[in-house]
């Protein structure tokens, strides 16, 4: 399979990476909001056994792996920096 070297292909790859990072940020915000709501429900209903730790911990493991996949085991980029990412890909592949 030939290497992707055209500017359009590099741009699309960089754009995909940016979309993955935006997806993680959305996932994390939803995680925080839902778990905050669960803690509030627990606090309002009598503060018995802290059952909220189970969804918080289980889902937290998923968020951790999502983070690692996007930011640690993937390439660096940011929403405002699609062109910067494209330039890195060009350099890795020996393009201009």
Image (cartoon, rainbow, N blue to C red):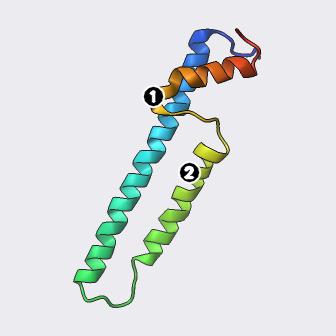
Image point (51%, 68%), residue name: 58
Quadrant location of residue 48?
A: bottom left
Quarter in which the N terminus is drawn: top right
Looking at the image, is mark 2 or mark 1 earlier in the sequence? 2
Cα separation between marks 2 and 1: 21 Å
As drawn, the label of residue 66 is 2
Q: x, y (%) of residue 83? A: 54, 20
Residue 35 position, x and y percent, is: 37, 67
**Above or below for 8 versus 53:** above
Q: Is residue 38 above or below residue 31?
A: below
Q: Judge left or right: residue 84 versus residue 36.
A: right
- CB atoms of marks 2 and 1 within 8 Å: no
- Residue that label 1 marks: 80
Q: Residue at x 60, y 15 (%)?
A: 9
Quarter of image, res 85: top right
Image coords of residue 52 (percent x, y) = 39, 76
Q: Nearer the viewer, residue 58 or 21?
A: 21
x, y percent for residue 24: 48, 46
Q: Is residue 25 left or right of residue 12?
A: left
**Residue at the image position 56 percent from the left and 51 percent from the top:** 67
Residue 46 as seen in the image, left or right of residue 76: left
Quadrant location of the C terminus? top right
Query: Of discs 2 and 1, which sits in the foreground?
Result: 1
In the image, residue 2 sits, relative to residue 18, either above or below, namely above
Disc ID at residue 37: none
Which type of secondary structure does the marked residue at label 1 adopt?
A: helix
10 Å neighbourhood of mark 2: few (<14), some, or many (≥20)?
A: some
Q: Which residue is rendered at x = 56% and y = 18% of the image?
A: 11
Task: Report helix, strand or loop for mark 2.
Answer: helix
């Amino acid at each position: 399979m030939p290497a992707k070297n055209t500017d359009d292909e590099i741009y699309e790859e960089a754009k995909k990476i940016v979309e993955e990072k935006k997806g993680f940020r959305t996932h994390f915000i939803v995680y925080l909001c839902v778990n905050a709501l669960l803690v509030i429900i627990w606090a309002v209903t009598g503060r018995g056994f802290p059952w909220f730790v189970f969804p918080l911990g289980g889902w937290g493991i998923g968020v951790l792996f999502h983070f690692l996949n996007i930011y640690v085991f993937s390439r660096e980029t940011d929403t405002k920096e699609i062109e910067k990412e494209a330039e890195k890909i060009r350099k890795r592949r020996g393009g201009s």
